[in-house]
Structures are given as C-alpha cells and as structure tokens.
Amino acid sequence: MPAPQEPQDPKQQDPAVDTSEQMEINQEQSASDDAAQPFPEAEARTDLEWATLLSETQEKVAQYHDELLRAKAEAENIRRRAQDDVAKARKFGTESFAESLIPVKDSLEAALALTEQTADAWKEGVEVTLRQLNTAFERNVLKDVAPVPGDKFDPHLHQAISAVPSDFPEGAVVQLLQKGYTISERVLRPALVMVSSGQPAA
C-alpha cells in the first residue's frame, strides 16, 4: 500500500516557477532599487568638472554678447552712412545737370560778345546752342511733353486751360500752348493745352 503524500512546504517549491503576483513584486523591488541609486553621470562629475563647465558656459555668453554689440555697432554705421549718402545726394544731386549746362552758357556768352554778325550767323549760333541744351536734357533724362492736336488728354501730363468746340472727339487735345517736361518719368511741368468739348452745335 503506497505511503500517503506529505504536503509540500511552500518554501521548497520550484524556484523556476513564478506567478504573476511574484513578478509584480519583483518589478516593484527593482524600480525601488533603481530610484534609490543616484544618477551615475551626476555622481561621476567632480567639482573641477562643474567649474570647467561653468567657465565654458560663461565664455560662450561673453562671446555672444560681444557678437551682439558688434552687430549693433555695424547696424548703426550702416544707418549713418545711409544718412550721409542722402545728404550728399541732396547737396550734389544737380551737379551732373549743372555740368551739362555750362557749355550752353559758354555759347550764349560767346554769341553776345560778337556784336557784328549777320542774321544767318546769329541763327546758326542759336541752333548750335539749342543742340547743346538738348544734349544736356538727354543726358539727364529730361524729356519734352508736347502732345499734337488729336492726342488724348492725359491729366497726369497735361493741364487743360480751356475746352473749345472742334472736329476732334471730346477730350482730345486741340492746341498745345506750352510744352511740359518730365525728368526720369516724373513730371516737372505739365503741358498747357486746349481740349475739345466735342462737335460744334449746328
């Protein structure tokens, strides 16, 4: 007759066999052990290493501050140079135009100095002087505004003195009274014109 089995002691159970409850207990113990240990990197840093790190950080801050001051100074220099350029442009902006007009003045003075001239000589001298003046205008982008009869009235370039009945369509230029001028597409003086008010009444 077989002997009755004796109950096993829980402490003598197979250690390889682990329940889910025992696994949770093991994980909690492991996490607790990790939390109790200090960070190895922080623990490894000595006072000398912390001082070195602080010194390097301070050097970088000083470098960035110096670069900021240099950039600010450069921006201020650029602003001052721009102001100087604007002031010089205002002061010497007419220098090129004035230089172009000097030969015109020379020609006029030379013509007046010659008292004994024929009418043809006077005319020729005036034509030469006018060509010099036109050259000065072209050099400085100064152009005539001279609409011909029938051109459409442009309020940006023309100034209407009056409206008269004519065979031209209403709003067309009938007669040019005085030339206008532009410089670099900017109106210096509008052309004075008379415009058409339409067909005359029958």
Image (cartoon, rainbow, N blue to C red):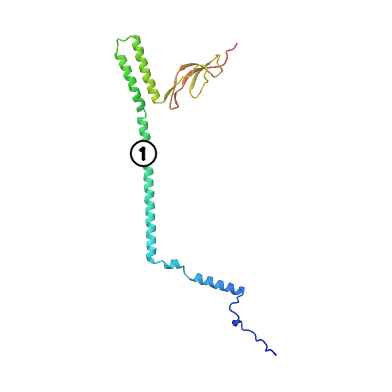
Q: Residue at x 57, y 73 (%)?
A: 25
Decide: is 106 above or below 20: above
Q: Nearer the viewer, residue 132 or 169?
A: 132
In the picture as drawn, the residue positioned furthest to the bottom comes out as 1
Residue indicated by mark 1: 81
Decide: is 47 above or below 4: above
Badge 1 element? helix
Percent position of residue 37, x then y: 48, 71
Q: Residue at x 36, y 47 (%)?
A: 70
Q: Residue at x 49, y 21 (%)?
A: 159
Q: Nearer the viewer, residue 202 or 11?
A: 11
Percent position of residue 56, x then y: 38, 58
Q: Residue at x 39, y 61 (%)?
A: 53
Decide: is 141 above or below 40: above
In the picture as drawn, the residue positioned furthest to the right comes out as 1
For the C terminus, which image quadrant?
Answer: top right
- Occupied quadrant, residue 48: bottom left
Percent position of residue 153, x then y: 52, 21
Kind of residue sitting beneath label 1: Arg
Crowd rating for badge 1 (residues with CA inside 10 Å; few <14, some 14–19, many 20+): few
Percent position of residue 104, x then y: 34, 20
